[in-house]
Image (spheres, rainbow, N blue to C red):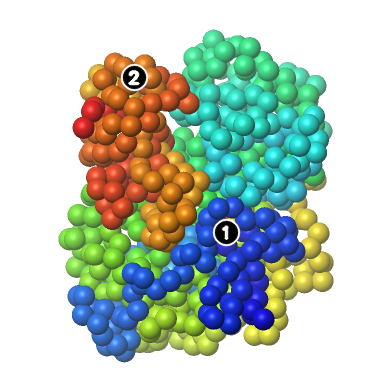
C-alpha cells in the first residue's frame, strides 16, 4: 500500500491541498486533496505534474565554497564570519537578505528575526515585492492593516465577478475551475474581465473590457464617481465606517467622461455597461492580481478598487469585496511574519516605536531595525554601488526575474560576498554565489504556507533529505548561533511556528488583524496533524469561512477605513524609437523561472518556446512573419523570441511570458528589457508597461 501524505502545492497562491503517495517501489504520485477547502480535490496541470519535478537531476546536494564541495561546519563558519565582519566594519545597512515567496513561513520567520532583531537592519526583501507589494500597501492605506477581507467561496456566492489584471484561467487555474463551475450552475452570474489581452479567462466573460495598459485607476475612478451619484451608494456604511469619501469622490469626478474613455481606451457604451452592472448587483467581488500590482500606479489601482467597495458597503460580506490574488504559494505567510523591508512581524508596523519595542522585547534581541530597509530594486542598486557587502539570497532567481536583470547580474558579480540557498545547482543566480547552500525542496521540507484567502496549511515532508541538504531555517539558525545570538535553538519547524503564533498574540488586545495565538502552545504532534485553518480562527472554531469588515472594524486607530483620493496617471510610455508597449506575464504550465517546471516534458510541451504576441497590423508594418524570430529591444536590453501574430490585444502592444532564461532559450530573458521603474508607495516594479521596439531577427 502506498504511504499517503497530505501536503500543499508549492506553486501558486491558490494553495491547493495535495495528497502525495509514495509507492512500494519508491515512485511518487499526486492527486488533489478532496478535503482541502481551497481545491476540493482539483489540481491544475502544474500541480498534477509535481511528481515529475522531484528527481535529483541538477540538485545541489552539498555545501560549496567557490564551486568546491565542503562540509556544513566550514561553510557556515565562513558565512557567519563574513556577515559579522560586514556588520562590524560597515554597520547593519551593509548586509541584506533577498528571500522568496517559496520559503515556508517558518523559514521566513527566522530570516526576518535574524535580520531585523539581531543584525539591526530591515534590509530583508523578497521576490514578493515583484508580486503583491502594491496590494499590501493598498490594504494598509485603506484598512489600516494588510488584510484580505474575503474567502474563496465568495467567488461562488457572487452575482458579479470582476477580474481585473488577472488571467485567472492560467495563473490561478483551480479558482478559475471553481468560477467556471459556479457560472455553469448559475448562468445568471456575470463575469467581467478587464485586461488589455483577450486571455483564456475571457472564455467565460460576459463582458471583456480591453483596457489600455495601466488604465485601471481611471476606470475605477470613473466607477466611484458614478456610484456616488447612484442608488448603490451605502451612505450609512460610509458615514459610520469610513473617512475621506468626499475627497476621493471629488478627485474621481475631476475626470470627464471623454477623458475617462480616452484614458481607458473603452467606449462610452462599454463604460456604461460596466458601471450599470456594478451599480445594480449587490453581490460583487473584484479579484485582482499582477495586472494591477505590477505597475507604477499599482497602489493607487488597489485603492481605486477598494474605494468602490467601500462606497457600496460591499466589503467582507458573503459574495462581496475586493480580493487580492497572490501569485506565490507563501507570499501571504511572508507578509504575516513581516518578511518585507517595510514591515515588522505579525502585521506590526516598523514605523511604530511601540511595535518595534514590543517585538524587540518578545525576541529579547539586542537591537531592532529602526527604519524600513531597502526594497528589492533599491536593494540591488545598493549591491551594485557597493553599499551592500554581504548578501544572502534564498529560493529565488533574481538574475532572471528582477527588472533590469542584466544590472542585477552585474551587481552580484561585483558584490564582495554572495550566499545563495537553493535546491538547484546551476541557475542564473547560483552562478554568482561565493557560497552555495543546499536547501530542501518540496516533499522534503516541513512547515506551513498561507494562501490568498488567509488559509494556513501544512506543507509536509514525505521524502528523505537528499545528500546533505538542510532546511533554510536551520541554515540561518546555525549562522545566528555562530554569530553569538541567543534565541535560535530551534529543533523543529513546530517550535518556530509556535513562537510565530505567540508573537502574533503578544500584547495584542484586539488591535491587530493577524492573531493566531491559539496555536502558540502547539506541540510537535499537533503541528504535524494541523488541519488547514483560516485566520483569525481559534482552534475550536472549525473551518467556517471567516471574513473581515462586514460591519466595519477596520484597523486604523479610529477603526474606520480610508478612501484614498487617487489621480489617473499618464500611461503611454512609447516614443518614436520604442513605439510598442510590452506587457509581461505568465503562461499556464510554467512557474517563475522554470527551474522546476522546466524538468517536466509534459509541462514544457504546452508551450515549448518563448514567444511575443504581436498584432497583425504591427507585424505587417514591421515585416514580422508569424512564427519567425523577432528581436525586442528596450533602452535596457534585447531579447529574441518566436513571433506569434494575433489580434488578442490592441495594435501597438506586445505580450511576452516572463519565464524563460538563457538555460532554456538563449536571449529570452525578458527581465533584461524591463526598467527598474517602481510604484512610489509600494516599490513594486512596473513590469507590464514597457516601451520597446521589434524587428525580424
Ligand atoms: Fe498548484 Fe496553483 Fe495549480 Fe492549485 S492552482 S494545483 S496551487 S499551481
Front of the two marks 2 and 1: 1
- From this view, report whether residue 528 is shown above or below residue 507: below
- What number of labels is visible? 2
The residue that label 2 is drawn on is 618
At which x and y percent is residue 177? 67, 45
- From this view, report whether residue 115 is shown above or below residue 675: below
Say the numbered circle drawn on residue 38: none
Question: What residue lies at 38% left-to-right and 31% top-to-bottom?
Answer: 644
* Residue at the left extreme of this rendering: 414
Q: CA distance from mark 2 to mark 1?
A: 38 Å
Q: Quadrant of residue 575?
A: top left
The residue that label 1 is drawn on is 48
Of the two numbered discs 2 and 1 on the same chain, state the one appearing first in sequence.
1
- Image quarter (top left, top right, bottom left or bottom right) of the C terminus: top left
Q: Is residue 634 visible?
A: no
Q: Is mark 1 within 8 Å of ligand 1?
A: yes
In the image, 498 versus 437, the foreground residue is 437
In the image, 371 versus 323, the foreground residue is 323
At which x and y percent is residue 370? 42, 63
Q: Secondary structure at mark 1?
A: helix
- From this view, report whether residue 562 is shown above or below residue 328: above
> Ligand 1, what quadrant?
bottom right
At which x and y percent is residue 480? 39, 82
Question: What residue lies at 77% left-to-right and 71% top-to-bottom?
Answer: 539
Q: Quadrant of residue 412?
A: bottom left
- Image quarter (top left, top right, bottom left or bottom right) of the N terminus: bottom right
Q: Secondary structure at mark 2?
A: helix
Taking the image as shown, residue 457 lies to the left or right of residue 210, namely right
In the image, 18 versus 542, the foreground residue is 18
Q: Quadrant of residue 506?
A: bottom right
Amino acid at each position: 500500500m502506498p504511504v499517503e501524505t497530505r501536503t500543499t502545492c508549492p506553486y501558486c497562491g491558490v494553495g491547493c491541498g495535495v495528497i502525495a503517495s509514495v509507492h512500494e517501489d519508491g515512485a511518487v504520485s499526486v492527486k488533489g486533496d478532496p478535503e482541502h477547502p481551497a481545491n476540493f480535490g482539483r489540481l491544475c496541470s502544474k500541480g498534477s505534474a509535481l511528481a515529475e519535478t522531484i528527481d535529483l537531476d541538477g540538485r545541489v546536494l552539498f555545501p560549496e565554497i567557490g564551486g568546491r564541495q565542503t562540509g556544513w561546519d566550514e561553510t557556515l563558519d565562513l558565512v557567519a564570519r563574513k556577515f559579522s565582519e560586514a556588520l562590524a566594519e560597515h554597520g547593519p545597512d551593509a548586509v541584506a537578505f533577498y528571500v522568496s515567496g517559496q520559503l515556508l513561513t517558518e523559514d521566513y520567520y527566522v530570516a526576518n528575526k535574524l535580520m531585523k532583531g539581531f543584525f539591526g537592519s530591515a534590509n530583508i526583501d523578497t521576490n514578493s515585492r515583484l508580486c503583491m507589494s502594491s496590494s499590501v500597501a493598498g490594504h494598509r492605506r485603506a484598512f489600516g492593516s494588510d488584510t484580505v477581507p474575503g474567502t474563496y467561496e465568495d467567488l461562488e456566492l457572487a452575482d458579479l465577478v470582476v477580474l481585473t489584471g488577472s488571467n485567472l484561467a492560467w495563473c490561478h487555474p483551480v479558482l478559475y475551475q471553481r468560477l467556471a463551475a459556479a457560472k455553469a450552475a448559475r448562468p445568471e452570474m456575470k463575469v467581467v474581465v478587464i485586461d488589455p489581452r483577450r486571455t483564456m479567462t475571457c472564455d467565460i466573460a460576459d463582458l471583456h473590457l480591453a483596457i489600455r495598459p495601466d488604465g485601471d485607476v481611471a476606470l475605477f475612478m470613473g466607477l466611484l464617481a458614478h456610484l456616488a451619484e447612484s442608488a448603490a451608494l451605502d451612505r450609512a456604511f460610509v458615514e459610520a465606517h469610513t473617512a475621506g469619501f468626499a475627497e476621493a469622490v471629488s478627485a474621481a469626478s475631476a475626470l470627464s467622461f471623454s477623458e475617462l474613455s480616452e484614458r481607458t481606451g473603452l467606449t462610452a457604451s462599454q463604460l456604461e455597461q460596466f458601471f450599470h452592472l456594478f451599480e445594480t448587483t449587490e453581490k460583487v467581488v473584484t479579484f485582482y492580481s499582477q495586472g494591477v500590482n505590477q505597475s507604477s500606479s499599482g497602489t493607487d489601482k488597489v485603492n481605486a478598487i477598494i474605494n468602490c467597495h467601500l462606497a457600496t458597503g460591499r466589503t467582507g460580506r458573503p459574495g462581496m469585496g475586493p480580493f487580492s490574488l497572490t501569485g506565490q504559494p507563501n507570499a501571504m505567510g511572508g507578509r504575516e511574519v513581516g518578511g518585507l523591508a517595510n514591515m515588522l512581524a505579525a502585521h506590526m508596523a516598523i514605523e511604530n516605536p511601540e511595535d518595534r519595542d514590543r517585538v524587540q522585547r518578545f525576541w529579547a534581541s539586542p537591537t531592532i531595525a529602526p527604519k524600513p530597509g531597502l526594497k528589492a530594486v533599491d536593494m540591488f542598486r545598493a549591491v551594485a554601488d557597493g553599499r551592500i557587502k554581504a548578501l544572502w539570497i534564498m529560493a529565488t532567481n533574481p538574475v532572471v526575474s528582477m527588472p533590469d536583470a542584466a544590472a542585477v547580474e552585474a551587481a552580484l558579480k561585483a558584490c564582495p560576498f554572495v550566499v545563495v540557498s537553493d535546491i538547484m545547482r546551476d541557475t542564473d543566480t547560483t552562478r554568482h554565489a561565493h557560497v552555495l547552500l543546499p536547501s530542501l525542496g518540496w516533499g522534503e521540507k516541513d512547515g506551513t504556507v498561507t494562501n490568498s484567502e488567509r488559509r494556513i496549511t501544512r506543507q509536509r515532508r514525505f521524502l528523505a533529505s537528499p545528500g546533505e541538504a538542510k532546511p533554510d531555517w536551520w541554515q540561518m539558525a546555525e549562522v545566528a548561533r555562530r554569530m553569538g545570538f541567543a534565541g535560535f535553538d530551534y529543533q523543529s519547524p513546530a517550535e518556530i511556528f509556535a513562537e510565530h503564533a505567540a508573537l502574533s498574540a503578544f500584547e495584542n488586545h484586539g488591535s491587530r488583524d493577524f492573531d493566531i495565538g491559539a496555536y502558540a502552545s502547539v506541540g510537535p504532534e499537533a503541528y504535524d496533524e494541523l488541519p488547514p485553518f483560516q485566520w483569525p480562527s481559534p482552534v475550536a472554531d472549525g473551518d467556517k469561512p471567516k471574513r473581515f469588515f462586514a460591519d466595519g472594524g477596520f484597523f486604523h486607530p479610529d477603526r474606520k477605513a480610508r478612501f484614498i483620493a487617487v489621480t489617473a496617471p499618464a500611461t503611454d510610455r512609447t516614443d518614436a524609437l520604442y513605439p510598442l508597449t510590452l506587457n509581461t506575464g505568465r503562461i499556464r504550465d510554467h512557474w517563475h523561472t522554470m527551474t522546476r517546471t522546466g524538468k517536466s516534458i509534459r509541462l514544457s510541451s504546452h508551450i515549448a518556446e518563448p514567444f511575443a504576441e504581436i498584432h497583425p497590423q504591427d507585424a505587417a508594418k514591421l515585416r514580422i512573419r508569424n512564427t519567425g524570430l523577432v528581436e525586442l529591444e528596450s533602452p535596457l536590453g534585447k531579447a529574441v523570441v518566436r513571433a506569434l501574430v494575433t489580434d488578442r490585444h490592441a495594435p501597438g502592444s506586445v505580450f511576452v511570458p516572463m519565464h524563460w532564461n538563457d538555460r532554456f532559450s538563449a536571449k529570452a530573458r525578458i527581465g533584461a528589457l524591463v526598467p527598474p521603474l517602481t510604484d512610489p508607495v509600494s516599490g513594486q516594479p512596473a513590469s507590464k508597461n514597457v516601451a520597446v521596439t521589434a524587428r525580424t531577427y
